[in-house]
Amino acid sequence: MNESNRSPQNKNKGWIESFKNAIGFFYRRVNKLFDRIVFNKAGSLIVSLMISLVICAVVDYQDIRYELFDNTSTTVNLGNVDVNILSDQEQYEVSGIPNSVQVTLTGNAAEIQVYRQQHTNLSVTADLRPYEEGSFIIDLSLDDLPSSIEATLSPSSVTATITAKKERSFTVDPEMLIGSGQRASDFKTPTLSSSTVKIRATEDELNAIRFVRAIVDVSGFTNGDQYTTEATVVAYDAEGNRVQVEIDPSSIEATVEKNDTDTE
């Protein structure tokens, strides 16, 4: 029968058979290749590795996307951060520097988080080391801040007054601290190992001092005729308020004796 005399139905059957044969051939080739890979030790390891990588990529996609592509800027308020003063505190007294300032960080969220984890004890620095006596405007700075993070400090600068310290000698007298059930008349006047101390402070602070006392706590004097203790030295102004200054020595050995007779 001539090709031209074949019916359309027979032509369709021939095309379908050819397609099925092609699919079958392709399937057999792929099946053989799969068997070679699966039943080959090196091939099976490669396939397992590729599958593992695909699974990890799918599971960790969000984290990978965040680390590589997320540049979202955020603002974090750290609240009050302590101010660290750098100065020669032996030679100078500094005033005008606040104890803490408000700090706000702006930048990439991940970088801010890393910075805070690496600096758990953040501090703001006021560097006065280049200055001597006088009043100066000092810029405050946050320690070890990366250039990629911006810090806003409130206040960002302060007016610091630097005053030179001076030293002066003062006479020190004992003052007894009486315990419960004790009387001042039970004891003789304490004897101090030193009658003078040196006080280092600004001129105004030195001029404010009116008297210096060695506080002798006799509450521990319960037995015996003599008691020895360390007495803390304190400076007072004219109103009896304590003046915070450097005293050398800060404590003096004091010896206390009981009176021979009691006086009612």
Image (cartoon, helix red, strand yellow):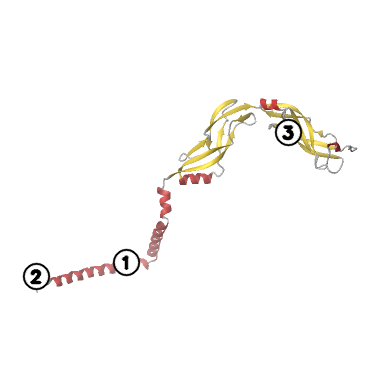
Q: Mark 2: which secondary structure?
A: helix
The kind of residue on which mark 1 rests is Leu
What residue would you read off at disc 3?
Answer: 234
Which image quarter: residue 51?
A: bottom left
Name the mark nearer the viewer: 2 or 1. 2
Q: Is residue 105 visible?
A: yes
What residue would you read off at disc 2?
Answer: 4
Q: CA distance from mark 3 to mark 2?
A: 127 Å
Q: Mark 3: which secondary structure?
A: strand
- Marked residue nearer the N-terminal end (3 or 2): 2
Of the 4 image quadrants, the one containing the C terminus is: top right
Residue 185 placement (x, y as % from top left): 85, 36
**Residue nearest the viewer, comparing 132 with 161:** 161
Which image quarter: residue 242?
A: top right
What residue would you read off at disc 1?
Answer: 33
Q: Mark 1: which secondary structure?
A: helix
The answer to whether residue 95 is above or below residue 81 is above
Q: Verify CB contact (< 8 Å) between mark 3 and mark 2.
A: no
10 horizontally vs 249: left or right:
left
Q: CA distance from mark 1 to mark 3?
A: 95 Å
Q: Residue at x 42, y 50 (%)?
A: 66
How busy is the neighbourhood of tag 1: few (under 14 within 10 Å), some, or many (20 plus)?
few
The kind of residue on which mark 2 rests is Ser
